[in-house]
């Protein structure tokens, strides 16, 4: 074959001329397409907050680091996701570039690829040539060395922000985090462990104070509510800046039927899934879960799983069964749970949560843990359905282990106050998780019953009433009105109402409860007989003695038949008969008073609470039947015993002191009677208030005693 081919090449093209068959292979190498950020001179977060609330002290400290000649420093802003670390960094960035003449450089450090691309873009900004950058990208030159070489030789002082560095290993691997005399480095992270940040100054970013949090909402959604409305919403959102921003955005951008702040707050409380409503305020979250409260913490959980700490996720799901109030660490001590959380891994799991700012330690007399409420709701929302019952059962088991099964009378246990919100939160979680079994719901209800009983027996009647009322509503929804635990919680409501001086209301509550116990459990059941005693007490005070005596005798006979004549509950019922007012009914019962005390001492011991109550009631019966000398000895003995076992301020001790003052007046010792009554008046006014019937009663007695003393000491007019 002969002939001639003409051709022309342009640019990188070539022309080949040949005869015969030829196989030609060409390799064309092109420069890599730019994969770095579009800018390192501006924070890629959209519009920064117009006003940064309650960060003045923090920003002030950071501003010192960008003054003239300041450098060679690293600051680490750490805190919970959504607490506003990036907003603080933005404020410093704005100040440094506009007012201090610094060059601002911003790099996303959330993952290795973003960090590497961003830092090489910083090198290019500071004068690195194409060849140097290509060598660094291809691994022919150490990339971090290149970047820091150019930062060290920068002709302008700079501020470098490494944002979202939630995995510090990304910065450590390759040596990306360094210092330079030409600039200041600011890192934002959720990772609080100091060992990740040697030689850096760690600055904690917390949620906002109440007033400033409310103002954030009013900044974003002006005219939608008052300062108090905004403060109420801020409290519901845990004053977390991200949640506040989303709520404000939602309120500000409604068009068809705008809500007020009051309406938003009400909807937030009513919704079984408040997180969904909060997230509706994100106008354009894109694929960035950091902009949504439902997803922002998943980044930290993924990181924990990647660090071989899946138990930390289980522990956080367990914490989500409880409240955002401080949780005593003793609750997690010696943990033995039927969960994928071995006891020897609890400590590591907790440290993982602390290091990732997912919870925090709270100093105080009782060492506690505190986890943000919006975080807990978010975690509860995505907890797998097949794990919920197991988690709730474990949470109830730990509470039951910390709450006494049969609380004794006496001064308040220091654990009761911090455990209270967690018991009620568990009940609410049981309500919102349909997967919870009846057994687990009953365990949660038992926690509430033990708590209310312990509060009552410690003398804190107001707390016992509040706990029992809230728990009853929740338990009835889940277990029904006729469940025995719901009925027993109603017993606690009635008893606390009685002790708070609302006698008519207490009588009505116990009467309705007696009907329900007779219908559900039967007329001879122990719960029914106990309600008979509870109803008899306010009836005595309301001067319905005949009915009260019938109920007391029914309880004594019923308990003796079921339990025997010497059982503590039978002896307790017999002691109640000695509290009757003067009259023929008391005259009959008082004859057996000393025998009852002897029976109690023999069967229960001299210091048993029922023995002490029987002795005190016997002293009252002796006084009311005219045996004043015997009553005085018995009353002094009863007061001394109650002071020794329960303390001077315990309600029954005050009742014993009040009785002693009565006996002293009866035997003519008015000065000492006044002294004892004054002690009672002071404490009752402080604890129960000036209008409580017991407080009014002691004031009336003081008036009589003082008049009696004045008459006895006044000179004879003859």
Image (cartoon, grey):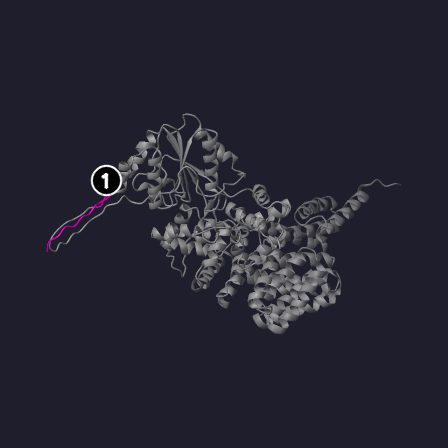
Instruction: In this rendered view, identify the residue nearer to me: 325 or 102.
Output: 102
Point out residue 84 in the picture as x, y percentages from the top left corner.
48, 43
Front residue of 4/612: it is 4
- The answer to whether one can see residue 608 in this image is no
Residue 416, given in percent of the width and then of the height, sits at 54, 52
61 vs 245: above or below: above
Whether 569 is among the magenta residues is: no
Give how far across and how far down residue 199 sits, in percent. Answer: 36, 34
Q: Is residue 629 visible?
A: yes
Q: Residue at x 22, y 47 (%)?
A: 28
Task: Identify the image quadrant of the N terminus.
Answer: bottom left
Q: How would you classify the magenta stretch by its main secondary structure?
A: loop
Does the magenta run of residues contain 11?
Answer: yes
Q: Is residue 33 left or right of residue 504?
A: left
User: What number of labels is visible?
Assistant: 1
Considering depth in this image, is 568 or 54 the residue closer to the camera? 54
Left or right, 15 with respect to 560, comes to: left
Image side of residue 443 versus residue 128, left or right? right
Residue 474 picture location, percent across and down: 57, 62
Quarter of the rendering occupied by the C terminus: top right
Determine whether the residue tagged by mark 1 lies in a helix, strand or loop.
loop
Residue 93: which quarter of the image? Answer: top left
**Snapshot quadrant of residue 96:** top left
Between 420 and 279, the one lying in front of the other is: 279
- Residue bounds of the magenta highlight: 1-13
Name the residue tied to disc 1.
140
């Amino acid at each position: 074959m002969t002939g001639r081919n003409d051709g022309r090449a342009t640019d990188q093209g070539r022309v080949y001329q040949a005869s015969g068959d030829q196989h030609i292979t060409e390799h064309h190498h092109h420069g890599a397409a730019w994969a770095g950020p579009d800018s390192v001179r501006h924070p890629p977060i959209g519009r920064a907050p117009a006003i940064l609330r309650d960060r003045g002290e923090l920003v002030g400290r950071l501003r010192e680091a960008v003054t003239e000649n300041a450098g060679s420093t690293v600051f680490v802003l750490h805190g919970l996701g959504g607490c506003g670390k990036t907003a603080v960094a933005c404020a410093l960035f704005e100040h440094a570039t506009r007012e201090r003449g610094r060059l601002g450089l911003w790099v996303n450090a959330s993952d290795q690829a973003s960090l590497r691309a961003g830092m090489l873009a910083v090198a290019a900004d500071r004068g690195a040539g194409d060849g140097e950058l290509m060598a660094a990208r291809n691994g022919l030159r150490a990339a971090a060395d290149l970047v820091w070489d150019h930062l060290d030789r920068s002709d302008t002082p700079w501020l470098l922000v490494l944002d979202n560095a939630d995995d510090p290993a990304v910065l450590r691997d390759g040596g990306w985090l360094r210092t330079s005399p030409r600039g200041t480095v600011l890192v934002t992270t959720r990772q609080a462990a100091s060992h990740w940040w040697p030689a850096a100054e760690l600055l904690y970013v917390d949620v906002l104070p109440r007033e400033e949090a409310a103002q954030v909402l009013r900044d974003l959604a002006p005219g939608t509510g008052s300062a108090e409305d905004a403060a109420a919403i801020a409290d519901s959102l845990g004053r977390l800046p991200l949640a506040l921003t989303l709520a404000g955005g939602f309120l500000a951008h409604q068009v068809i039927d705008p809500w007020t702040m009051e309406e938003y707050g009400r909807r937030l409380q009513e919704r079984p899934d408040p997180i969904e409503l909060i997230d509706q305020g994100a106008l354009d979250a894109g694929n960035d879960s950091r902009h949504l409260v439902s997803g922002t913490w998943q980044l930290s959980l993924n990181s924990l799983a990647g660090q071989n700490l899946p138990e930390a996720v289980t522990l956080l799901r367990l914490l989500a069964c409880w409240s955002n109030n401080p949780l005593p660490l003793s609750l997690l001590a010696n943990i033995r749970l039927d969960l994928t959380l071995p006891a020897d891994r609890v400590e590591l799991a907790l440290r993982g949560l602390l290091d990732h700012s997912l919870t925090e330690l709270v100093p105080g007399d009782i060492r506690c843990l505190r986890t943000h409420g919006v975080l807990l709701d978010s975690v509860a929302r995505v907890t797998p359905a097949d794990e919920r019952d197991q988690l709730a059962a474990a949470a109830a088991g730990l509470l039951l282990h910390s709450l006494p099964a049969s609380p004794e009378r006496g001064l308040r246990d220091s654990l009761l106050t911090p455990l209270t919100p967690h018991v009620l939160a568990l009940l609410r979680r049981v309500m919102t998780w349909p997967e919870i079994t009846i057994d687990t719901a009953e365990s949660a209800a038992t926690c509430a019953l033990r708590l209310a009983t312990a509060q009552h027996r410690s003398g804190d009647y107001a707390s016992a009433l509040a706990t029992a009322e809230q728990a009853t509503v929740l338990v009835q929804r889940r277990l029904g009105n006729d469940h025995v635990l719901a009925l027993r919680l109603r017993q606690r409501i009635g008893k606390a109402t009685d002790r708070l001086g609302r006698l008519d209301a207490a009588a009505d509550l116990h009467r309705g409860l007696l009907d329900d116990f007779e219908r559900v459990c039967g007329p001879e059941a122990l719960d029914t007989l106990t309600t008979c005693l509870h109803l008899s007490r306010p009836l005595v005070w309301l001067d319905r003695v005949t009915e009260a005596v019938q109920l007391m005798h029914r309880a004594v006979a019923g308990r003796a038949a079921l339990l025997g004549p010497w059982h503590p509950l039978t002896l307790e019922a017999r002691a109640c008969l000695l509290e009757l007012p003067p009259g023929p009914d008391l005259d009959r019962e008082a004859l057996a008073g000393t025998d009852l005390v002897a029976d109690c001492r023999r069967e229960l011991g001299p210091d048993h609470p029922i023995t002490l109550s029987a002795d005190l009631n016997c002293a009252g019966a002796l006084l009311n039947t005219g045996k004043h000398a015997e009553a005085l000895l018995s009353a002094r003995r009863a007061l001394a015993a109650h002071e020794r076992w329960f303390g001077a301020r315990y309600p029954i001790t005050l009742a014993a002191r009040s009785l002693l003052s009565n006996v002293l007046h009866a035997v003519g010792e008015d000065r000492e009677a006044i002294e004892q009554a004054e002690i009672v008046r002071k404490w009752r006014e402080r604890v129960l208030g000036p209008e409580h019937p017991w407080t009014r009663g002691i004031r009336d007695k003081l008036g009589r005693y003082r008049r009696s003393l004045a008459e006895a000491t006044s000179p004879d007019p003859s």
